[in-house]
């Protein structure tokens, strides 16, 4: 039998070139595609989501409607909006837990009865379902609104002298030989964008407001609830 290895002690302080010390953490922030179901479950079940929403509800009488709307947009939504990267391969059972947090946040903002259908909740705040938000997360990278580690994975294809669709903005799609490779952000973001461009046919960048309007016409929620 092998002897049990001792738990390594925290490493000594490491100083960066700018003179600051690296922080020791027990959990890493994952910056790519999660390939372990157990790690995915842990990520989705992160108590942070529930704790944050619970603290809001405990003090909801202290917030105005506008304040509640802003608080949710600045805290809960950014956590959920990295779905295309982290939750790409999650099962519907796991994703439903995120939907529950999302719906609770909308109830917090709108004071809508808990019997309100989720499609009506989305209409009350003018937000899309998480399913649609996951499809458009890569847009933030294209517009330079995402962190550098994501934006660096999106490359605009060089223009050619041929006629036709080549004049539209397209992204370089890297080679991916496996189904898992197709789920990675670098492949899926470029592939999704190029597919969308078959309808949008954008030749130049437009304002974010105009872009969202065109996206809303292309990507719509189709409720299948019974």
Image (cartoon, rainbow, N blue to C red):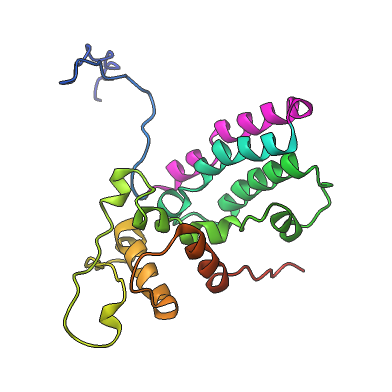
**Side (left or right) of 40 relative to 49:** left
**Side (left or right) of 124 relative to 148:** right
Residue at the (33%, 47%) spot, across then down: 32
Instruction: Name the spot of residue 189 as percent of width and height, x first.
Output: 36, 62
Residue at the (40%, 51%) spot, across then down: 85
In magenta, the rendered stretch is: 34-63
189 shown above or below 57: below
**Side (left or right) of 9 relative to 63:** left
17 shown above or below 188: above
Q: Nearer the viewer, residue 84 or 60?
A: 60
Q: Nearer the viewer, residue 184 or 69?
A: 69
Q: Nearer the viewer, residue 91 or 208?
A: 208
Instruction: Name the spot of residue 96 as percent of width and height, x first.
Output: 62, 52
Whether residue 35 is in magenta: the answer is yes
Instruction: Name the spot of residue 197 as percent of width and height, x first.
Output: 39, 75
In which quadrant is the C terminus drawn? Answer: bottom right
**Side (left or right) of 6 relative to 208:** left
92 shown above or below 218: above
In which quadrant is the N terminus drawn? Answer: top left
146 shown above or below 172: above
Whether residue 48 is in magenta: the answer is yes
């Amino acid at each position: 039998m092998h002897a049990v290895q001792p738990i390594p002690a925290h490493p000594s302080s490491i100083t960066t070139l700018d003179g600051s010390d690296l922080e020791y953490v027990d959990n890493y922030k994952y910056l790519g595609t999660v390939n372990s179901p157990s790690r995915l479950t842990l990520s989705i079940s992160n108590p942070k989501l529930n704790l944050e929403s619970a603290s809001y509800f405990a003090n909801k009488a202290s917030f105005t409607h506008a304040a509640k709307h802003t608080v949710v947009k600045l805290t809960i939504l950014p956590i959920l909006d990295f779905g295309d990267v982290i939750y790409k391969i999650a099962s519907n059972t796991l994703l439903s837990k995120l939907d529950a947090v999302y719906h609770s946040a909308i109830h917090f903002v709108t004071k809508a009865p808990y019997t309100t259908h989720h499609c009506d909740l989305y209409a009350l705040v003018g937000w899309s379902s998480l399913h649609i938000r996951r499809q458009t997360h890569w847009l933030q990278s294209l517009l330079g609104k995402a962190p550098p580690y994501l934006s660096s994975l999106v490359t605009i294809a060089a223009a050619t002298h041929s006629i036709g669709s080549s004049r539209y903005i397209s992204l370089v799609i890297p080679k991916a030989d496996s189904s898992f490779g197709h789920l990675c952000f670098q492949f899926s973001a470029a592939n999704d964008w190029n597919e969308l461009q078959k309808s949008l046919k954008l030749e130049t960048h437009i304002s974010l407001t105009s872009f969202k309007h065109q996206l809303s016409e292309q990507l719509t929620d189709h409720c299948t609830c019974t």
